[in-house]
Amino acid sequence: MVDVLFSEADIAEQVSRLARLISQDYKALVSRQHPLIVLPVLKGAWIFSADLVRCLALPVRLEFLRASSYRDGTSSGELHVDIPDIASLGGHHLLVIEDIVDTGRTLSRMLEDLRACHPHSLKVCTLLDKPARRIMPVELHYRGFSVGNRFVVGYGMDLAECYRELPYVGDLGGS
Ligand code: IMP
Ligand code: MG
């Protein structure tokens, strides 16, 4: 049984708020020739980033990052990070889009790799933050909701590849 934790309306409100902040912060910095490069982390951030980019009043280029740390269910497996065409990211404003930051391991590893390509700037936007579980400190520049130590699904997020299609963020209980 999945309980609704954040409804479609709750999410839409946060998406608009975050998009307004991001648009304000970058409007003087980017142009069609030098767009903001938005980097959603697949697969979890696909729905959030699709909604977010459509609310941005900015020229955007899209590149996808791929990270997998949850192999089966909720237990943390080996961490794999895939950044395509990394050389082309140098000198640009980069915004990583995450679904949820839990221990921070995935994000800190990706940020380390992205810093190595010398971006003009590097920031993070996450829909959800689970600060109680943090192991690696990471700065979250744009953050939607904070959640306690619970496993959430829906709106792109999964448990063993299930529940991604739910239009809301749901709660599967403590993990
Ligand atoms: P971290 O490396 O521990 O911060 O985990 C990062 C990734 O694990 C997130 O981007 C999610 O894809 C996944 N994850 C962490 N917590 C949850 C959860 O509660 N539900 C679904 N996926 C999660
Ligand atoms: Mg993720």
Image (cartoon, grey):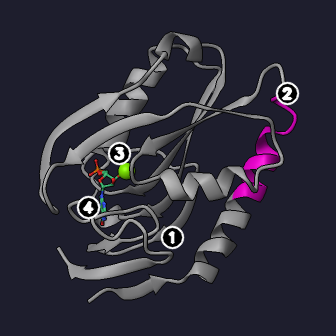
Q: In the rendered structure, which disc, 3 or 1, sits on the residue that comes first in sequence?
A: 3
The answer to whether residue 25 is magenta is yes
Which residue is pictured at 39% across the width and 73% down the height?
147
Q: Which residue is mark 4?
A: 133
Q: Which residue is mark 1?
A: 145
* Quadrant in which the N terminus is drawn: bottom left
Marks 2 and 4, Cα distance to the nearest angstrom? 38 Å
What residue span does the magenta drawing correspond to? 19-31
Residue 7, image x and y in percent? 54, 83
Q: Which residue is mark 2?
A: 31
User: Which of 161/134 is in front?
Assistant: 161
Which residue is pictured at 58% across the width and 79% down the height?
8
Residue 32, image x and y in percent? 84, 26
Q: Nearer the viewer, mark 2 or mark 4?
A: 2
Q: In the rendered structure, which disc, 2 or 3, sits on the residue that comes first in sequence?
A: 2
Element at badge 1?
strand
User: Which of 76/32 is in front?
Assistant: 32
Residue 73, image x and y in percent? 15, 62
Question: What's the residue type where badge 1 is placed?
Answer: Phe
Task: Classify the position of ligand 1 by quadrant: top left, top right, bottom left or bottom right.
Answer: bottom left
Question: What's the residue type where badge 2 is placed?
Answer: Ser
Which residue is pictured at 66% across the width and 64% down the height?
15
| Circles 4, 1 touching at the beta carbon (< 8 Å) | no
Q: Is residue 43 above or below residue 162?
A: above
| Circles 1, 2 touching at the beta carbon (< 8 Å) | no
Pointer 4 local density, CA inside 10 Å: few below 14, some 14–19, many at least 20: some
Pointer 2 local density, CA inside 10 Å: few below 14, some 14–19, many at least 20: few
Question: What's the residue type where badge 4 is placed?
Answer: Arg
Q: Nearer the viewer, mark 4 or mark 1?
A: 1
| Circles 3, 1 touching at the beta carbon (< 8 Å) | no
